Image (cartoon, coloured by chain):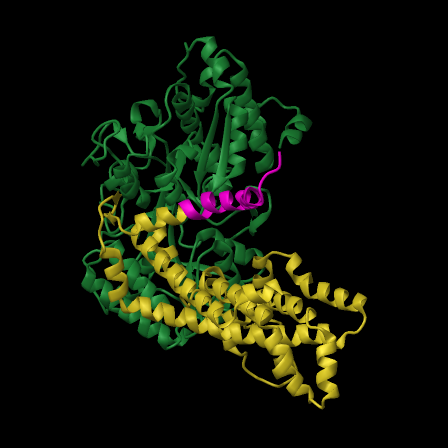
Amino acid sequence: MDVKRKKTGSKGNPTNTAKVTPETSWAERKVSRRDVLKGAVVATAGLVAGSGVIGGFPTVWAQKIKDIKLLQVGGSYSSIIDIARQASKELGFTIKMQNASSDALVNRVATQPKSLDIADIEFWMVPKLIPRGVLGGIDTKRFKLWDKIVPIFTKGEYPDGRKVSRQGTLPYEVQYLDGPGSKKFHDGRSRWATLVPTIYNADTLGIRPDIIKRPIEHWHELLNPEFKGKTAILDVPAIGIMDAAMAIESRGDIKYGDKGNMTREELDKTIKILIDAKKSGQFRAFWTTFDESVNLMAAGEVVIQSMWSPAVTAVRARGIPCYYAPLKEGYRAWASGSCPMKHLSGLKLDAFYEYINWHQSGWQGGFIAKQGYYSSIPETAKKFLTDDEWGFWYGGKAAKGDIKDPYGKLQEKAGSIRDGGSFWERMGNVACWNTVMDESRYMVRKWNEFIAA
Amino acid sequence: MKLSQRVVSYLQVAPLALVMLVFLGIPAVMILTVSFFDYDEFDLIPRFIFGNYVELIESGLTYSLYWSTIKFAVMVWVLTLVIGFTASYFLVFHVRALFWKIALFLVCTVPFWTSNIIRMISWIPVLGREGLVNKSLMFLGIIDQPLEFLLFSNFAVVLAYVHLYTLFMVVTLFNSMARIDPAVIEAAVDAGASRWQVITQIVIPLSKTGIALGSIFVIALVMGDFFVVRIMSGGQSASVVLAMYNEIALLQYPPAAASAVVLVIIVSLMVWGILRIVDVRKELSN
């Protein structure tokens, strides 16, 4: 990217950015931001991108912050090294990133909180981690764009005022705290938040339309004997059981009070149905990693399974048709966010706020949009997408040109439409959220029974 | 000044003892301690309870997990033993030239130059529904439907284990067979022993140490595994450690610690049983 910037030599003239290719336009935008950086407001450059700039920090502070290194640990879909590089380049101090699977992540944050500076975690981990007192929380006054975050997070509702499903851990329920350092969640809005929401998506079933050859509209197709031996679910107990519950409820076997917080009786019934299905050979496999799910689908082992959005894209990239089917019952959604660890203070904490303000100012949102994920502040992401990209990823519109991934590789051909449609068609139809149940102890035991059956 | 023999021995043992104490002893004590802790959704509660063990012993799940894990261990043990024994026997008694002996022994270790995970995952494109084996068989017209049991099944799990762990049998057996004095075998043959009698009455008894050590390796590895089982069964079979892993994923350390302690006890009992049958120390001191 750097090379490209030098070659074009243009210094961020906004009039010519519209015509160039997406990558170049990114590069040029960076230039314009860098120019700002070089200006009088070095210390606060991270806060730019449209919003007002606060100046006035002493120069010493700007000097010292250069030596700061912050280590962020999170999932591979969210703590992406390209984002760390870009942040370090624009902010003038160093952001490092490490990836961990959700199991490893929650264990590390809980038991070795000092081994990282920034927790990049999913919202369902928050109720497990807040009572342990390891997270630093967010002062929303220091995050400039708080009011621009989509209301799903900040109010628990859609822009039209409809309430978002509370089955599972709706981020809003664990979004606010009583006060700084509090271990109690606050009902309703407050100045103190747990995480700055950063990335989220709505998950559903992926199918092989070339093999199934008919529309798939309901979750219960996962348990349809027609696909015996050719289905798979996720073997992460807390999430796998939700997908199973979506299928079971859709078939009409159980009407759950809250799929995200089952009673023991509901768990018993659910696991019994799953064991019966397993014994009759319904499942081909239970997958745990992204690659496994891609390979299962691409190799024809499985024709219908729970999947993540980029996994569907990865299957298609191999020239194999794969469809991320929007289903009548709705999506299972998840969301991640970032917060400083409790041990951060002084300059390091200041650096964290610099970073998180930069993080949500658009570059990251544009990057992850091209991987099929949503930004918590779509309007900033929009600035880093072409109109065509914005229309495709957020608008549910047919792509006018080829759609490329963040690395410039062809992802979707011109004319294609995103599966499930626009942002609000997808996020507006969430049935439940990733979660950990109150009965998680019992749930894990039952899940182990299912796997051992 | 000359150190006494005793002090020298202690000094020689000290580095390993220290490493074992720090990296095995202390963690083991911690696991034992935590296994008696109580816990709630958020934290460990340092209070002495037997609840974790009671729950473990009362749960039918524990028994089915041990049943399936021990079943794998026994199957793998038998297969690795037969394959390991045959391979070592061939290397030691059929290959005459020392050069070829060593060369072929090294060939046995070639697959182990790559990582465990790669060796295991390579089976997936071979055994899959559209994998090498199924495609070939269908091409040859031997089958018209792909064989589903090849992958994501107990068959696949055992296959991967045998592939991964046979070397431990080969190495230990090769080592003890190579120590058998050829004169003993010549004498037996001269006295009219058949090949079978030579194997059962001379080779097997004299390679007991190798069998015992190889068995300990294989059984301990299979009992403590969760990764092979998870990948090769496509997540459809469980093992004791996999269940533990699921508990740890949700921060339920005390019950996981309790099952770890029980597993250590059971594996120790198995090792103790093997050592009761074969006095490794006596054999090694020869």
Q: Nearer the viewer, residue B212 or B190?
A: B190
Q: The N terminus of chain B appears in which quarter of the rendering?
A: top right
- On the question of residue B269 being in view, the answer is yes
Q: Position of residue B162 (x, y in %)?
A: 56, 70
Q: Is residue A1 left or right of residue A384?
A: right
Residue A324 falls in which quadrant of the image? bottom left
Q: The C terminus of chain B appears in which quarter of the rendering?
A: bottom right
Tell me the green chain: A
> Dominant secondary structure of the magenta stretch?
helix
Q: Which residues are magenta?
A: B1-26
In magenta stretch: residue B17: yes
Residue at image x 49%, y 11%? Answer: A40
Q: Position of residue A195 (x, y in %)?
A: 33, 35
Q: Is residue A36 left or right of residue A445?
A: right
Q: Position of residue A380 (x, y in %)?
A: 42, 32
In magenta stretch: residue A344: no
Tell me the yellow chain: B
